[in-house]
Amino acid sequence: MDDRKSPFDVIGQLGALRRYARSLVRNPDDAEDLVQDALMRAYERRPTFHQGANLRAWLMSVLHNTHIDSLRRKRSQTRRVEEAALLSQGLHHGGAEDVVRLGQLREAFFSLPEEQRAALHLVAIDEMSYQDAARVLDIPVGTLMSRLSRARARLRAFEEDRTPTHLKIVGGTDNDHG
């Protein structure tokens, strides 16, 4: 058996990584998540580590960059949510009926099969091109178009099948519309 240490021995660096992560995020659970994400990223990028280089410095750099990427992702997501809220405030002047309808439309969207929902989200919500969305999903463009077509057809069927208010008139029947 070979007793030599591997030049990529990250176990000896865990304490330092955890301490640095905790100083960055100030929460033990988040720090553990950050260390785990950074170690996964480091393992994926292991070929870029030059033998003889300072492993601790390289791992700290990976951890720092993972943290920065996480912050950027969170800021971007927060900004999108805030923009959507502002947009919806400007567009939504309806009453309870509209709230019910939007909830039902949301349910219909989330009831789509995962592959259709993902395709529709990337193209319709994130406004990606068909080529980019197909690349993200790792599928041919034709497959993406087929999934989009099926998703849109299911949502159109939802719209066509609903009654004007989706609410039953008290004392009436489902066929009473006014």
Image: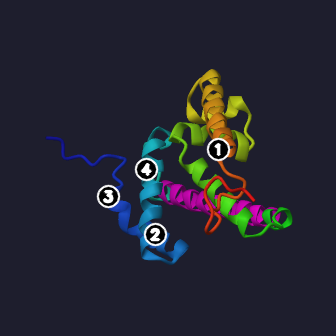
Query: Quick check: 26 left or right of 177?
Result: left
* Mark positioned earlier in the residue sequence (1 or 3): 3
Q: Residue at x 48, y 44 (%)?
A: 49
Rounded to the nearest angstrom, the CA distance separating label 1 from label 3 is 59 Å
* Mark positioned earlier in the residue sequence (1 or 2): 2
Rounded to the nearest angstrom, the CA distance separating label 3 from label 4 is 13 Å
Q: Kindly give the residue lying farthest to the right in the view shown.
A: 90
Q: Which amino acid type corresponds to the residue marked 4 in the rendered image?
A: Met
Between 46 and 128, the one lying in front of the other is 128
Residue identifier under label 1: 161
Question: What is the crowding at mark 4: few (fewer than 14 residues within 10 Å), some, or many (at least 20)?
Answer: few
Rounded to the nearest angstrom, the CA distance separating label 1 from label 4 is 47 Å
Label 2, secondary structure: give it: helix
Q: Residue at x 61, y 58 (%)?
A: 173
Query: Quick check: 139 left or right of 46?
Result: right
Residue 141 found in image quarter: top right
Q: How is the image coloured?
A: rainbow
Residue identifier under label 2: 31
Numbered disc in front, either 3 or 4:
4
User: Do the CB atoms of the residues marked 2 and 3 lie less than 8 Å apart?
Assistant: no
Q: Residue at x 47, y 74 (%)?
A: 22
Indicate the position of residue 170 as horizontal and vertical percent values: 62, 69
Indicate the position of residue 158 as horizontal and vertical percent values: 64, 44
Q: Main secondary structure of the magenta part?
A: helix
Residue identifier under label 4: 40
Q: Which residues are magenta?
A: 58-87
Rounded to the nearest angstrom, the CA distance separating label 2 from label 3 is 16 Å
